[in-house]
Amino acid sequence: MNKAPRPLDGLRVIELGQLLAGPFTGTILSYFGAEVIKVEPPGGDPIRTWRILREETSLWYYSLGRNKKSVTLDLKSERGRQLAGDLLEGADVVIENFRPGLMESWGLGPEEIKQRNPGLIYARISGYGQTGPYAAKPGYASVTEGFGGLRYINGEPGKAPVRPNISLGDTLAAIHAAFGIALALIQRARPPAEGGGAGQVIDVALYEAIFNLMEGIIPEYSGAGAVREPAGTTVTGIVPTNTYRCGDDKYVIIGGNGDSIFKRLMVAAGRPDMAEDPALADNAGRVAQEPAIDAVLARWCQDNASVDIIAMLEEARVPVGPIYSVADMFSDPHYAARGLFETVEIDGEPLEIPAIMPRLTGTPGRTDFAAQAAGSHNEEVFKEILGLNDEELADLAEQGVIAK
C-alpha cells in the first residue's frame, strides 16, 4: 500500500454527523490523511442502506465511508455521551451536523468541550446556521437549495424549477466545512501572540454554501434592481454559450462568448460575415442579437453529427464538449489517465469509487480502504484511545450503548 505522506497525517477527527454533509466532510479529511473516527448509532448511519446495495450495504456508502474507523455509540444514553466527550477531549477536530442545540443538550456543545480541549476545532453543519430566526428549522439540501437561490435560476422560464439529481447543497456544505477546518488549522498553528493555539467554531449553513454560488446576482439586484431569472440552457447576459442538439440527436455545449473565440466559432459555422460584423464584436452587441446567433448555431449543429461539431470546434480552438453520463465517463481515456476512479474490494469483488479532489502533486490524497461495517473499530478505538477493557466493552454492548 502507498504510504506517501499526506497533509493531514496525525490529525484526529471525530465525525458525529449522519447522512451526507457531515460524513462527506470526514471523507475529504480522511482522504488527505486525517484519522477519522466515525461515531454511528448502534444500527449504523442510515445512508448505509440507501439506494443500490451490495452485501446489505449501499454501494454509495463504500465510497462515503472510506478510510474511516467506525465506532458505535448510543448518544441518547448518558454513558454514550460520556464516551463521546472523552473522544472529543483528545481530538483535533469534531464534525457534527445535528439540528442546532442538540449537542448542547447532550453536554457536548462547543463551550462545554472547550473547557476540556481548548484547541478543538468544532465544525457545525446545519440547514440555516447556528443563529438567526430560522436556525431551528429542519434543513435538508433540497429545501436549502431553494432558499439559497439556486432552484430559482435553474430550469426553463415559466416552468417548475429543476433539481439536479444529486444532493448538491450537502456536498457544497461539506466542501465549505473542510475548507473552514483547513483555515482554522492554519490559525491554530500560529504563535499565541498572533491568536494561535486555540480552536474555534466553524458554522456552515447549507443555504449559505448555495448562496456562495450566486456570483453577480446580489450586486446586480442591489445596484440595478435586476432579478436573475431562469434561462434554460443559456446564461443571462453572456452570448453565445448554450447547448445544441446535433444531427445524431446528441447534445453539445458550446462556449463562444470571448470576442476572438466568437470570430473563430462563426467562421467554423460557415458564417464569416457574422464573425466580422462590428455589431457583434463585443458581448454587449451579441447579447442584443442573441436569438439570431443561437438560431444560426442551432441550424449548423442540427446539420452535423456531434462528433463532427466537436472536431471542427476543437480544431478552431473554441470551447466545446459533449454531455456525459457516468457510462461515458468510464469509457473516456482522459478520466482514466487522470486517475478519477479508484478500485476497492468488497468481499473479493472490485468496486470503482471516485477519487477526491483537489489533486496535490507533493502530498496527494488516497483511498486506503472502503467503508467497514458499523462498529468495526470499537475494540481498537475504545481500548487504545479511551483505555477500556474487555469487560467494560462487553458491558457497553449488553447495555446497548455500542453494537454487539
Image (cartoon, rainbow, N blue to C red):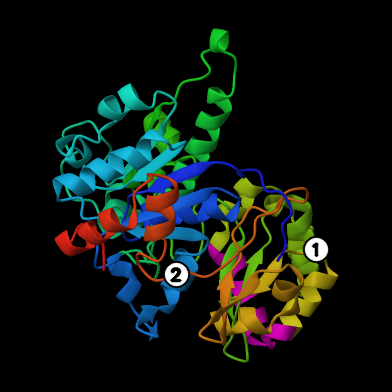
Q: Where is residue 217 shown, x and y percent of the image?
A: 43, 41
Packing grade of label 1 (10 A; few <14, some 14-19, many >=20) is many
Q: Nearer the viewer, mark 1 or mark 2?
A: 2
In the shown orientation, is residue 261 left or right of residue 77?
Answer: right
Instruction: Choose between 377 and 141: the one closer to the eye.
Output: 377
Q: Where is residue 175 shown, x and y percent of the image?
A: 48, 48
For label 1, the SS is: helix
Q: Quadrant of the N terminus?
A: bottom right
Packing grade of label 2 (10 A; few <14, some 14-19, many >=20) is some
Residue at far right of view:
315
Magenta residues, dominant SS class: helix
Q: Does the magenta stretch include residue 73?
A: no
**Magenta residues?**
291-307
160 lies above or below 92: below
The quadrant where residue 334 appears: bottom right
In the shown orientation, is residue 173 left or right of residue 81?
Answer: right
Which residue shows up at 27% across the image and 47% down it?
A: 127
The quadrant where residue 3 appears: bottom right
Q: Does the magenta stretch include residue 294?
A: yes
Q: Where is residue 241 shown, x and y percent of the image?
A: 60, 61
Q: Mark 1 points at which residue?
A: 264
- Residue 48 appears anywhere in the view: yes
Labels 1 and 2: the sequence-earlier one: 1
Q: Name the residue under label 2.
A: 372
Residue at far top of view:
193
The numbered disc on residue 305 is none
The quadrant where residue 193 appears: top right
